[in-house]
Amino acid sequence: MHTAVGIIPARLASTRFPEKVLADRTGRTLVQHVYESAAQAASLSRVVVAADDERIVRAVRAFGGEVVMTAVDHPNGTSRLREAAERLGLPDDQIVVNLQGDEPELDPNTVNTAVAALVTTEPRGAVVGTVAAPLEPSEAGNPNVVKVVRALDGRALYFSRSPIPHVRDATSGQPPAYLRHVGIYVYRVGFLTRYATMPGTPLERAEQLEQLRVLEHGHTIAVGLIDCAHPGIDTPGQYEAFVARWKSRQVSEKDDRQTGR
């Protein structure tokens, strides 16, 4: 198993849900849930939070996590990740995993699959690994759900907010399944540094999707497959739903312990 360093870019500001990484109605902050889930991944030897505020630093240290302070004004999580890698002194060949700080139900297997996607396809030119999961056709038209289409060998052909692929003729046989892109990225530190210096690209700006910059500059993204996507937290309502699921699981686990199951 190749060991990677998981880095969680965590910023305090959030338009739809301010300070969500510190939401703690489960008794743990949102960022702690992400940290503890990621730490279970066999492919990670270390997990670090890249914070932009002292309150996040204090919250992470309170549960015994590792944290590094980064600048407030990064344009995106990838830029923050690069600064964190520099501050941690990670070498160019170190594999790093960009973990989303608002996905508390992250499946450790998702991390392992993304790391494997990069490592197994690097000899064929891949510089980024990520994952996708099956998507219900009813969700394909939602622009907030990013879709991806793959080549037969697993390379990403395109990412879009539009429903791709488009099936022109329903009688042309079994259509390919829709795939939801899961926002986890794996790369070597050396490519992460290169990416940060690449100019923005037209498709990236049009779709507002960072990963398109990689494709437009001619690089390869490998896409592994997982069974289902884990939900992220963008709004207070989604957080409330997560809290309800978490509490339900706690009750179920308590009942199992009491009955010896």
Image (cartoon, helix red, strand yellow):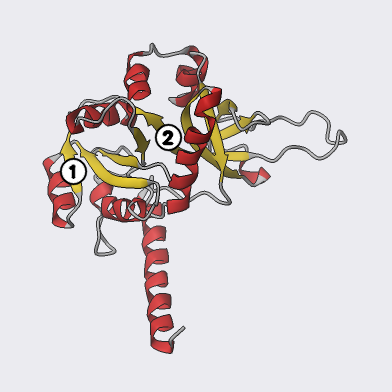
**In the image, 11: left or right of 55?**
right
Query: Quick one: 132 or 129, which is closer to the camera?
Result: 129
The residue that appears at 85% across and 37% down in the rendered structure is 173
Q: Secondary structure at mark 1?
A: strand
- Point out the tag, 2 or 1, that comes first from the N-terminus: 1
Q: Looking at numbered disc 2 in the image, what kind of residue is underneath it? A: Tyr
Residue 209 is at least partly visible in this image: no
* Distance of label 2 from label 1 (alpha carbons): 19 Å
The image's mark for residue 185 is 2
Q: Secondary structure at mark 2?
A: strand
The residue that appears at 59% across and 28% down in the rendered structure is 155
The residue wearing badge 1 is: 67
On screen, residue 71 above or below 229: above
On screen, residue 186 above or below 214: below
**In the image, 83: left or right of 147?**
left
- Asked whether disc 2 touches disc 1, contact meaning CB atoms under 8 Å apart, the reply is no
Query: Quick one: 142 or 123, which is closer to the camera?
Result: 123
Crowd around label 1: few <14 · some 14–19 · many ≥20 (10 Å): many
Residue 77 is at least partly visible in this image: yes
Q: Looking at numbered disc 1 in the image, what kind of residue is underneath it? A: Val
**Quadrant in the rendering for residue 166:** top right
